[in-house]
Image (cartoon, rainbow, N blue to C red):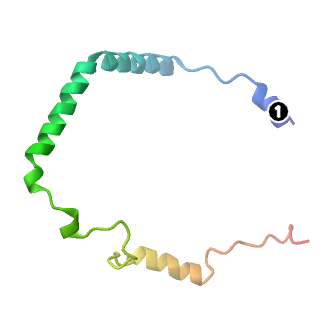
Amino acid sequence: MTSNNENNNRNPAKESTKVIKFRRKLEQFYSEQDKKITQMAKERMKNKIEQWISDNVKDRVPVQKKGCSLFDGNANSEPISFLAKKIRKKIQQGYFSPVQDPENDA
């Protein structure tokens, strides 16, 4: 039997030709995408987003009026689903408790 240290020192399996071919295609695709995204394109998109936000500011709801919070103490929680109730009942009945192995009890 080999130890863990010996297993870690082995060379990994070679990649198949399909994996190598796919990896090359991905690298080529991402390098082409990087070439298309220039600093000027980023700046243009930033300006478009800022313009859209300023155009739609009239439709925004002030947070103070709406009164939203991240956590409301489960005051508005969803009802428990049928499946969750069923699983909870099985847990309470001990359905998922570990099985005792008589050989290891000794």
**Frontmost residue, 16 versus 76:** 76
Q: Position of residue 103 (x, y in %)?
A: 86, 68
The image quarter containing residue 22 is top left
For this orientation, the residue located farthest to the right is: 106
Q: Does 94 appear above or below 35?
A: below
> Considering the numbered disc 1 on the image, is that residue within a helix, a strand or a loop?
helix
User: Which residue is at 84% across, 72% downward?
Assistant: 102
The image quarter containing residue 59 is bottom left
Q: Does 57 appear above or below 95?
A: above
Say which amino acid is labelled 1.
Answer: Asn
User: Which residue is at 42% across, 74% downward?
Assistant: 83
User: Which residue is at 77% across, 73% downward?
Assistant: 100
The image quarter containing residue 85 is bottom left
Q: Position of residue 44 (x, y in %)?
A: 18, 26
Q: Position of residue 48 (x, y in %)?
A: 15, 33
**Frontmost residue, 35 versus 89:** 35
Quadrant the N terminus occupies? top right
Quadrant the C terminus occupies? bottom right
User: Which residue is at 39% across, 17% downward?
Assistant: 25
What residue did someone put label 1 on?
5
